[in-house]
Image (cartoon, helix red, strand yellow):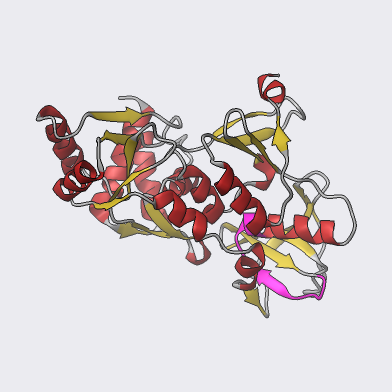
Amino acid sequence: MRSAERGDLILEWCSLKGSGSRHSFEVACRSVLGPLVRPLQLLHELELSGHIEVDWSHGGHWWIAPPVLSFLEGAGGNAVLLGARSPKTMSLLNHLKEIGDIRALTLVPQGPASPSAVFVGVSSIAALTAAAQVIGAEPKTTVRLEYKDALILLEEAVAAGKSEFAFSGIQAKKLNVATLCFEPCEVRFGNWMPGCYEQMSYGMHKYLYVDDQGVLYNVDRWIAVHAEINRVRGSGFGAPNPLSWSLESQSLFCDARAQLPTMWARAAVMCTGLLPIRHVDPADGHYVDEYRGVLGTTYNRILLTLGYKAQHRSMTEEEN
């Protein structure tokens, strides 16, 4: 059995279990996929794909999302299946294909151990609604717009993590915005200087953003990273713009050292239902995440809410 097919089994296991701890997910992944699998990466990919929700701030507890069958503009006239996906779901979809109620049922492999993306060929909203009813899913036609319009300003996401104290931890590192890498630093007596920090706390990496007024925010890694990029740029120092977009290919490129936070990454994924592809950027030799089929309106919304200016790629840059 291929890793991708075993990844489908993990999603089916999540769908049947309903919810669980990070530990239970790790045990299941290693049992099905082997000892070399990276469970937290797979958990995050399931989250980006709209299959599960994860509470990272409280140890990675997860729960399955309700099934949704939705049209996506970038899915070639197909509907994508999001949320829970049990063996019964796939059996019912195969039956609908056999009797001609849906035109096609396509499973698109993604990462080496990621679940396949499931696309359902339907010719109308009525056919979408009928198929969704059979498999117990909610039919939707605007899921991309829902995710795009739900994006909040980065400042609001940061403010939600405001705290009087930092997570207790060890081995503090501070983000170097010039390299987008965390470097060891020394913090004496809890005196945090403005910046973005990483430290180990109870076996997990925790992240702290400190603004120019010394206010502490315990937030997600990528929220903290983008907040720090904005802070440094606002102070008049040079800071990279990790985002670019190609009009020709409709692809959004994001420097993998400053990944899109979950909410923003989901908005990009929901343009096509496909996870980003990671590859080396020939321009600087660093890895980038390429989100395919991202419409200009979604790209502009991501720019606006994260605080970046538009940066376009030419076809030549993509081919080099």
Q: Which residues are magenta?
A: 212-223
Does the magenta segment cover residue 213? yes
Does the magenta segment cover residue 196? no
Quarter of the C terminus within the rendering: top right
The picture places residue 225, in percent across and down from the top left corner, at 70, 55
Residue at x 23% of width, y 43% of height: 128
The picture places residue 223, in percent across and down from the top left corner, at 64, 59
Residue at x 60% of width, y 60% of height: 220
Quarter of the N terminus within the rendering: top left
- Please, is residue 261 above or below residue 210 in the view? above
Residue 252: in sight, yes or no? Answer: yes
The picture places residue 183, in percent across and down from the top left corner, at 79, 50
Residue 278, quarter of the rendered image:
top right
Q: Nearer the viewer, residue 302 or 54?
A: 302
Q: Nearer the viewer, residue 256 or 25?
A: 256
- Please, is residue 74 above or below residue 63 in the view? above
The picture places residue 49, in percent across and down from the top left corner, at 42, 45
Residue 210, quarter of the rendered image:
bottom right
Outermost residue to the top = 320
Left or right position of 15 against 92: right
- Please, is residue 289 above or below residue 185 in the view? above
Left or right position of 228 against 273: right
